[in-house]
Image (cartoon, grey):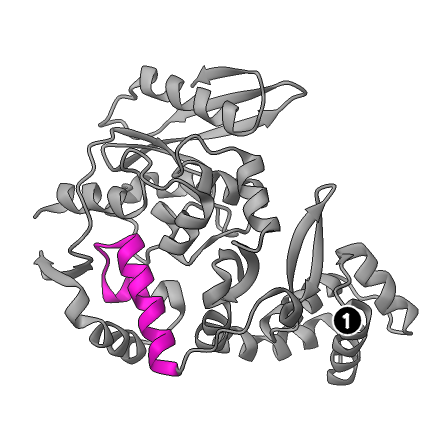
Amino acid sequence: MNINDIRSQRLSSHGFWSQEFSSSRELITHYWAIQAQDYQWACWMIGSRVAWSTLADVENAISYKDIVRLWPMRGTLHMVNPSLAHSFIDLCASRTLSSFPKRRAYLGISDTEIEKALAVIESSLRWWKSLTRMELEEALLSSGLKKKKQWIYHITCYAATRKLICFWPRQWKDDTFVLFDEWIWPNILNSDEGIAAIARSYIRSHGPATINDLAWWTWWNKWQSKNALWLIAKEIDAIDIDWTIYYFAPTNIWNTQETVLLAGFDEYFLGYKDRTLVAKNDDMSHYMTKNGIFSPLVVQNGEIIGKRKRTFKTTNIKIEYTHINKDLPPQKDHIEKLAQDFTRFYGLSDYSLIFH
């Protein structure tokens, strides 16, 4: 196995093998959690890996509770399989929770105010009510709390990390919240079971990957990550390439698909501490900004070759592709075909594709 083989097998682990998943539920069961900072891109991350999927299919899976949107780790939104939601928050969000007091102090929110806010949210949502972010803010203001800059985003993130709330299906493109314990069924694993399940899902969906990659993704320390891999040692294989050990599931198959349209914040690029296996260091600044915005990218033979921008119009999409990797010329006919799939996913009738 060499670096090209690593890329090939990663494509397969991520589901880019003749789109082997038949539903959004199958896909999220494979991953257990995928980045969902941008809602539309998160939906395409699922849709790009599920045969003939549409945006409506993904949103139906959210409505049927096959997928739930949470802040399970790294203080970042993810689409999560509800059956592992408790474990992700219990085992991966501890570092996130420890950062909240400092952020509250910066925003000028006292401990008394945050506890009152949680109580107001709980009483406002109890008995299967749902409220948009703006409606939650109105409830907090009505209780006598004073509005602070960026407070509603901090409060909702904190409440979700405390397992008080989670996202409900969107209403007219507005984020909507419900109580965590009314939406997500209890499935509490013991510590070792949860750690093993999270590590297993990561290696299965991201492997071959290193222990540093697992630690970065979960925010576990090195000892926790080693322990996690030890718990699943009989289920995974390992290989040493250039003094780096990569772990992978032996059931992974090899990928021959040549071109892939990634979502913004896609796990194929974002889900690793070391991204130099798929993108050149010199090109990295083109793919992500200093404030953590990850562009939608194009992959060819496992390597990132460029990025793209999409603009939604009434009945069509304008797609602009910018080529960056000078060593790999773009296969324009493949990108054209994928642009058709992308347009179909969003239920639009036409597209325009511009190469830069």
Principal secondary structure, stretch drawn in magenta: helix
Tell me the quarter of the picture where residue 103 sits: bottom right
Q: Picture coordinates of residue 281 (x, y %)?
A: 29, 45
Q: Residue at x 54, y 38 (%)?
A: 57
Viewer-side residue, 65 vs 327: 65
What range of the chain is rendered magenta?
A: 191-214
Q: Which residue is mark 1?
A: 126
Residue 266, relative to residue 354: is it above or below?
A: below
Residue 206, magenta (yes or no): yes
Residue 311, magenta (yes or no): no
Q: For the residue marked with disc 1, what is the amino acid? A: Arg
Q: Residue at x 17, y 47 (%)?
A: 6
Q: Is residue 35 left or right of residue 152?
A: left
Tell me the quarter of the picture where residue 221 sits: bottom left
Q: Residue at x 51, y 45 (%)?
A: 42
Label 1 CA crowd tier, 10 Å (few <14, some 14–19, many 20+): few
